[in-house]
Amino acid sequence: MGIAGLKPTEPLVATSYDAGTDTIGDWRLMDMNDDRTKLVIQYSQGGPCATAKGILTAETSTAVALVPLYQNGPATPCAAVLSTPVSTVTLDEPLGDRELLHLADHGTMQSPTPAPTR
């Protein structure tokens, strides 16, 4: 699995969301394996005065949500740079016909880039 020479890495795993300091980043689906248990995504982690926290994953019988998080730093000048890594997220169960969701920063669920068909 790999897109145009990109080698996916293991993502940091986030276990919680703190509304006071965390920001939700965007992501897009790049690829998935044949049994639909490994999703390769490119996601935003960090920005000015922010650092990567990881990807929060939630799975139900009808949907899977992937939520890249980063923590906001102090409101002072800093040299942090936006990072858009490519990582493989391993699901507990195959995606199957479950909907793949992105939790937007304003708190509503939205579908991301359509999944590749196999």
Image (cartoon, rainbow, N blue to C red):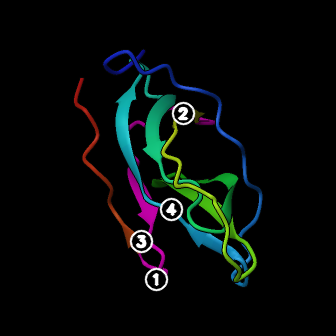
Are the residues flagged by discs 4 and 3 in contact, CB closer than 8 Å?
A: no
**Label 1, on which residue?**
106
For residue 23, which numbered disc appears in the image? none
Classify mark 2: helix, strand or loop: strand
Are the residues flagged by discs 3 and 1 in contact, CB closer than 8 Å?
A: no
> Mark 2 packing: few (<14 Cα in 10 Å), some, or many (20+)?
many
Q: Which residues are magenta?
A: 91-108
Are the residues flagged by discs 4 and 2 in contact, CB closer than 8 Å?
A: no
Residue nearest the observer in this picture, 99 or 43: 43
Name the chief secondary structure element in magenta. Answer: loop
The picture places residue 20, in percent across and down from the top left corner, at 73, 84
At 40% from the left and 36% from the top, the residue drawn is 96
Residue nearest the observer in this picture, 75 or 6: 75
Q: Amino acid at mark 4?
A: Gly
At 25% from the left and 46% from the top, the residue drawn is 114
Is residue 101 a member of the stretch shown in magenta?
Answer: yes
Q: Amino acid at mark 2?
A: Ser
Where's the C terminus, which quadrant?
Answer: top left
Indicate whether 74 appears above or below 80: below
Classify mark 3: helix, strand or loop: strand
> Mark 3 packing: few (<14 Cα in 10 Å), some, or many (20+)?
few
Classify mark 4: helix, strand or loop: loop
CA distance separating discs 4 and 3 = 13 Å
Query: Which callout, 3 or 1, points to the residue nearer the camera?
Result: 1
Indicate whether 12 appears above or below 55: above
**Label 3, on which residue?**
109
The picture places residue 62, in percent across and down from the top left corner, at 45, 54
**Label 4, on which residue?**
25
Q: Earlier in the sequence, mark 4 or mark 2?
A: 4
